[in-house]
Image: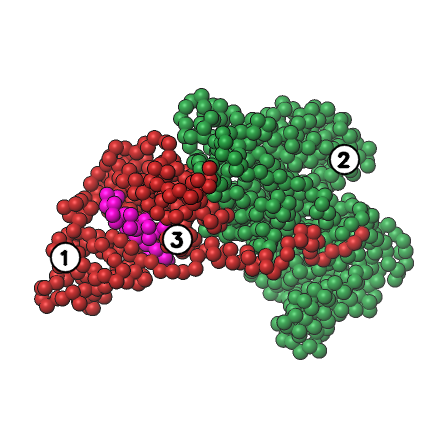
Chain colours: A red, B green
């Protein structure tokens, strides 16, 4: 059976599990699931080597719907468990699904350390800026002052931006996508999958029940061109319905500013060109205030760095090359004496 | 057993060596005085001389407590004997006090008539004040009733190492080796093993090495010339089983057990840890065992440390984690996940004083109820306990063997006393160690992740990367017949009972409870668990020697209990349960077996003394 599976090209259908999908009708998670299932066969990874790990929350039900190995774990801890999976077996393609609450509240610590370690796992964070499964409390990405079930007079704390958090943690791959934009999501998933190291993809995901329309201002088809900036390595940072707006550096403030090509002598040459290996630029792109600036989507940052798992493997291999395990000898090590 | 022995006089005439059955020696000084090194080296030489022994260090939680203060005092006690030794001893026969603070904190323990060696060079006005002495205690009744050997060790050391020309500061650091040299002379130990150790330790600093060797020899020479030969003793070698021996501490034994488990099972270990006293040494030791199939992962916190081990177990490795007190509390939820998903996992709890931060460097047995019961939901966990430093090796192997056989987490309880205590250990023959059989499921026919072995109720170990076995597991209740998510009421009851039955069924692999000392019925059974083994055993033996009808059993399997335990308890008129907590095992015994077991507790961060248990036995037998 396994031989047949390996020689035939897998299809989207092969990645659909027999479990009923239980997200609310209209939830952004459906679109993400479909796109992931579509991309999986493109990766060329043997079917049995794909593992999906999740924590707790709406997004974390994801592994049940994937016909792969899956582990629905505990709140916030998926990156730590995924690290065990990858350390145990480097052949596996390990994916983590998390949400803004799971990944940045209860699991913020594990996310930070997975990112800095650069272990070869793929993290997808579904950011809906709300707690869905607990029925509508504010999350660490909810906007300041947001009125929710637990904050009837407005959220008193300031939100964290997932992408800039990841860059701050020395992540080696940071991207942003939108649940409904299949083309963008597919491109990014492929890039994320092929990145050797921890890839972090934030996906703006609409919660139809508790935070409907949270991203409409830039994700809606009518708004997208004017308010999204699709960043592409080596391409100028241009956006707008007329494709005539771009980003440039304001030398006086060392910050970004929006310039209109053709106005005030601005030409395309004045516009910054995206360099995805520049973490300073990536950070600025991730933190642009909306709506004065567009929302940057695409691969914000990507740079090669040795992975944690490869380093650990090398250390173990070096130890094995140096010492032939002899348990009797190990047990008898140190000062011994005969009676 | 021999630490209380009176000199069995062979020749009492001045100048002749007296033969002792055994002795208890305590070294105490400032944390910077090198007392742990002194103790360890004295131990090595004593082991080479063929004595049975047990040791225990007692050091402050602070890394470098202010010099000269009572809370900066570091101690090391060794009990060595010509007969079997089971504890580091109660009251020392010899106390070495390197400064006033060490005298102040330790003098009350020294046996009346015992030998008190003090470094007068450290009895300065400033040090006396720091220790809280108004007058020099060496000139008051503080030292009455002891054999005082007051030596200016500081001055003697400086003069012994003078020829090397090292600085006074460096020369001062050699005091501990001078003292060790003197102790070696008193007990007739060879200097050679320590000289070799010094030369390898300070290989890069030949002058320092030379100075320490000179100090060691200087201490010895002082003994030869100072007309103190009435303090010279001989402790003959103990009659022990033939074999190769080494000294071993509990954490060391646990780490070796883990490496051995990897070798014996042919399955590699992923050890997840977060540094915590007193468990960190397990991580340190294991980080050097990569060639033996052990990968250590130092995680960002205690939760991540157990989670990385769970992830590894899910992927077909031996997932092991170790911690203590607050760290174990943090791991609780993840233990529930491993129980729910029925993954093999070993959690080692090196217990320390609690609650909260408690007493990080002190020992306690107060995590038993937490181990057996302390999780949300009906979450049965197998719980074992090691009884001595060397036993940590065997119980670690046992924990791994049964975790993989029953596809379940197992918690192994040790404690600070076992972790840091040490004893000579007969190195086992690898061929005699238990086999650890591991089977991974590969056959897709009829597979589902919760298909159980009818005998053990273990589910199959089906790991990612295996063709044809794609499946999902998780913390949400699983259907008995498919492993899929299930909220069905009857299914939950069935699964809860199955999980309980699986752990209860491990009893078939648990050896019957044996009697350590005495008979399997009678007036009084003293029943302990964990590190109280040595003190109880010795106290019961002494009581029997005095004609009392008392026996001793030590429980190593705490969940499930050995199948004959209830029966055994009922064959005694009374049962006494000494524990370093406020009565936890006794609570479980009373609820499981409806026996009126009596509790005897101590919760001072220190192990029981033999005398304390012996006295309690006497009281119980008289009441």
> Which of the numbered marks, if any, corresponds to residue B517?
2
Of all residues shown, which one is farthest toward the top? Answer: B490
- What residue sits 14% from the left and 46% below the top? A222
Q: How many numbered circles are shown?
A: 3
Secondary element type, mark 2: loop
> Residue shown at 41%/50% (left/top)?
A121
Say whether mark 3 and mark 1 are on the same chain. yes
Distance from the alpha carbon under mark 1 to that under mark 3: 33 Å
Q: Earlier in the sequence, mark 1 or mark 3?
A: 3
Q: Do residues under tags 1 and 3 come within 8 Å of each other at their CB atoms?
A: no
Task: State the residue position of label 1.
Answer: A243
- Is B45 rendered above or below residue A9? below
Q: Chain of mark 2?
A: B
Element carrying mark 1: loop
Residue underneath mark 3 = A198
**Chain to which mark 1 belongs:** A
Q: Nearer the viewer, mark 1 or mark 3?
A: 1
Q: Look at the image and give the residue range highlighted in magenta.
A: A167-193
């Amino acid at each position: 059976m396994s031989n047949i599976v390996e020689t035939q090209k897998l299809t989207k259908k092969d990645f659909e599990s027999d479990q009923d999908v239980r997200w609310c009708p209209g939830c952004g998670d459906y679109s993400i699931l479909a796109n992931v299932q579509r991309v999986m066969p493109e990766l060329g990874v043997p079917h049995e080597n794909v593992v999906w790990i999740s924590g707790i929350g709406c997004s974390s039900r994801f592994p049940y719907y994937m016909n792969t190995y899956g582990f629905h774990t505990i709140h916030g801890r998926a990156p730590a468990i995924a690290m065990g999976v990858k350390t145990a077996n480097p052949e596996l393609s390990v994916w983590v699904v998390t949400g803004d609450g799971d990944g940045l509240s209860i699991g913020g610590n594990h996310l930070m350390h997975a990112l800095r370690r650069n272990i070869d796992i793929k993290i997808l964070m579904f950011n809906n800026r709300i707690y869905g499964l607990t029925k509508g409390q504010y999350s660490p990405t909810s906007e300041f002052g947001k009125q929710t079930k637990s904050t009837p007079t407005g959220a008193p704390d300031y939100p964290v931006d997932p992408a800039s958090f990841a860059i701050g943690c020395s992540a080696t791959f940071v991207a942003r996508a939108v649940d409904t934009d299949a083309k963008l999501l597919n491109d990014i998933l492929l890039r994320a999958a092929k990145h050797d190291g921890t890839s972090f993809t934030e996906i703006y995901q609409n919660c139809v029940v508790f935070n409907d329309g949270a991203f409409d201002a830039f994700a809606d088809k009518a708004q997208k061109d004017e308010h999204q900036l699709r960043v592409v390595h080596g391409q100028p940072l241009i956006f707008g319905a007329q494709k005539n707006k771009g980003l440039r550096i304001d030398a006086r403030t060392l910050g970004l500013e929006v310039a209109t090509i053709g106005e005030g002598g601005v030409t395309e040459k004045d516009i910054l060109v995206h360099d995805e290996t520049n973490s300073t630029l990536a950070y600025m792109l991730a933190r642009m205030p909306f709506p004065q600036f567009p929302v940057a989507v695409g691969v914000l940052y990507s740079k090669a760095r040795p992975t944690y798992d490869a380093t650990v493997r090398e250390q173990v291999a070096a130890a094995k090359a140096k010492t032939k395990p002899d348990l009797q000898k190990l047990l008898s090590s140190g000062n011994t004496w005969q009676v | 057993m021999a630490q209380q022995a009176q000199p069995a006089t062979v020749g009492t005439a001045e100048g002749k060596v007296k033969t002792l059955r055994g002795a208890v020696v305590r070294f105490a000084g400032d944390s910077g005085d090198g007392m742990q090194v002194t103790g360890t080296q004295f131990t090595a030489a004593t082991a080479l001389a063929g004595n049975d022994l047990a040791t225990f260090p007692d050091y402050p939680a602070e890394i470098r407590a202010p010099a000269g203060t009572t809370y900066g005092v570091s101690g090391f006690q060794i009990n060595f004997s010509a007969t079997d030794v089971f504890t580091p001893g109660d009251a020392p026969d010899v106390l070495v006090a390197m400064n006033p603070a060490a005298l102040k904190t330790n003098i009350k323990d020294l046996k009346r008539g015992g030998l008190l060696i003090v470094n007068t060079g450290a009895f300065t006005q400033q040090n006396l004040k720091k220790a809280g002495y108004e007058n020099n205690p060496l000139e008051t009744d503080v030292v009455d009733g002891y054999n005082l050997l007051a030596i200016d060790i500081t001055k003697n050391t400086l003069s012994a190492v003078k020829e090397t020309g090292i600085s006074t500061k460096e020369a001062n650091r050699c005091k501990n080796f001078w003292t060790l040299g003197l102790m070696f002379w008193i007990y007739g130990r060879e200097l050679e093993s320590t000289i070799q150790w010094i030369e390898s330790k300070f290989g890069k600093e030949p002058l320092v090495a030379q100075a320490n060797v000179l100090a060691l020899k200087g201490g010895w020479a002082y003994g030869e010339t100072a007309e103190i030969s009435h303090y010279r003793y001989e402790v003959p070698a103990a009659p022990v089983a033939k074999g190769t021996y080494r000294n071993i501490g509990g954490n060391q034994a646990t780490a070796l057990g883990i490496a051995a488990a990897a070798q014996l099972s042919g399955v590699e270990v992923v050890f997840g840890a977060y540094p915590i006293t007193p468990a960190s040494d397990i991580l340190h030791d294991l980080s050097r065992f990569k060639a033996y199939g052990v990968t250590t992962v130092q995680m960002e916190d205690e939760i991540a440390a157990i989670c990385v081990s769970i992830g590894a177990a899910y992927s077909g490795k031996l997932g092991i984690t170790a911690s203590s007190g607050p760290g174990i509390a943090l791991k609780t939820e993840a233990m529930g996940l491993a129980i729910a998903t029925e993954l093999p996992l070993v959690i080692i709890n090196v217990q320390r004083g609690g609650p909260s931060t408690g007493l990080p460097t002190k020992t306690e047995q107060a995590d038993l109820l937490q181990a057996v019961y302390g999780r949300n939901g009906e979450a049965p966990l197998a719980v074992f306990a090691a009884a001595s430093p060397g036993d940590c090796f065997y119980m670690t192997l046992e924990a791994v063997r049964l975790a993989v056989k029953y596809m379940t987490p197992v918690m192994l309880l040790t404690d600070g006393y076992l972790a840091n205590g040490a004893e000579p250990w007969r190195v086992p023959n690898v061929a005699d160690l238990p086999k650890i059989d591991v089977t991974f499921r590969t056959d897709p026919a009829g597979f589902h992740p919760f298909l159980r072995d009818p005998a053990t109720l273990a589910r199959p170990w089906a790991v990612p990367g295996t063709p044809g076995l794609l499946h999902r597991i998780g913390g949400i209740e699983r259907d008995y017949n498919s492993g899929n998510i299930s909220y069905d009421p009857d299914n939950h009851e069935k699964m809860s009972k199955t999980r309980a039955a699986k752990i209860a069924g491990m009893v078939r692999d648990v050896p019957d409870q044996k009697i350590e000392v005495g008979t399997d019925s009678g007036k009084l059974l003293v029943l302990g668990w964990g590190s109280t083994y040595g003190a109880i055993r010795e106290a019961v033996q002494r009581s029997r020697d005095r004609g009392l009808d008392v026996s001793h059993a030590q429980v190593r399997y705490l969940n499930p209990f050995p199948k004959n335990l209830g029966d055994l308890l009922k064959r005694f008129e009374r049962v006494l349960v000494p524990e370093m907590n406020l009565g936890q095992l006794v609570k479980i015994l009373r609820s499981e077996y409806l026996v009126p077991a009596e509790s005897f507790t101590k919760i001072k961060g220190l192990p029981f003394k033999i005398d304390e248990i012996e006295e309690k036995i006497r009281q119980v037998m008289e009441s």
